[in-house]
Amino acid sequence: MSEAISAEERPDGRGLRIALAVARYHPQITGAMQETARRSLIAHGVAEEDIDIWQAPGSFELPLLAQTLAASRRYDAIICLGCVMKGETRHDVLVGDAAAQGIQRVALDSGLPVIFGVICAANRLQAQERIPRAAECALAAIELVSTLRRVRHPGAMHVCRHDQQDMVSTSERSS
Ligand SMILES: Nc1c(NC[C@H](O)[C@H](O)[C@H](O)CO)[nH]c(=O)[nH]c1=O
Ligand SMILES: CC(=O)[C@@H](O)COP(=O)(O)O
């Protein structure tokens, strides 16, 4: 049974700038994932104009796209979306492993939340069933931005571009 989330615990995406890096391969699946992630971000407070969508040919190219997006310093988090499906050879294994390891590397090298939203499915049905995972990726991005900020700035309240009040630190508030 899932527990109720209080207002304070609800992921708050206000003020965040998010990049979606989307692989075009299996476009019906990844297009639906893109829309699922976008709607989830907006439902959690991210402004529509603060979500940028960038496309890569396939999941293999996602790490380079993510690395370039991270280096641009324009985003608080990057969500990588793709769909790797079993073909006739083991190409899918190589593509999926390269995407997973490359995306992890970009996250560790950049210190930014870079979310792994690449479905690795045996067939189309399995992939379709996993499209809602893109919403989990959106929440993972918002949560990790918040957690990393609290670790990096333990004394501060929220750091938020748009809400000036939220930018006031605890020490400023008490003085
Ligand atoms: N088979 C899948 C691919 N393959 C394409 C590669 O990602 C890459 O674009 C190509 O090898 C050129 O470098 N990509 C997926 O996203 N999903 C697949 O199932
Ligand atoms: C080129 C590809 O990514 C894809 O066609 C691989 O599928 P297969 O394993 O059937 O060659």
Image (cartoon, rainbow, N blue to C red):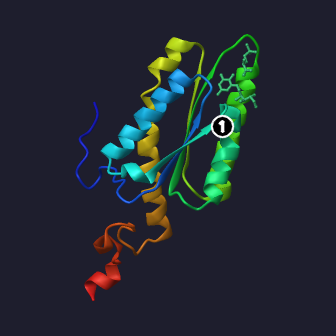
For the C terminus, the image quarter is bottom left
Given residues 134 and 23, the one toward you in this image is 23
Image location (x, y in percent) of residue 100: 66, 37
Characterize the local packing of mark 1: few (<14), some (14-19) or many (20 or more) Cα atoms within 10 angstroms: many
Residue at screen point 51% across, 21% down = 28
Q: Is residue 10 above or below residue 32?
A: below
Given residues 87 and 155, the one toward you in this image is 87
Image location (x, y in percent) of residue 71: 65, 59
Q: Quadrant of ligand 1?
A: top right
Q: Check the image and name the residue furthest to the top.
A: 88
Residue at screen point 35% across, 66% down = 162
Horizontal side of residue 128 vs 160, given as left or right:
right
Residue at screen point 39% across, 67% down = 161
Q: Which residue is mark 1?
A: 100
Give the image quarter of residue 132: top left
Given residues 175 and 59, the one toward you in this image is 59
Amino acid found under the numbered disc labelled 1: Ala
Q: Is residue 95 above or below residue 116?
A: above
**Residue 143 visible in the displayed image:** no
How many numbered callouts?
Answer: 1
Image location (x, y in percent) of residue 89: 76, 14
Q: Check the image and name the residue furthest to the front.
A: 49
Any atom of ligand 1 within 8 Å of the CB at mark 1? no
Q: SS of the residue at dot 1?
A: helix
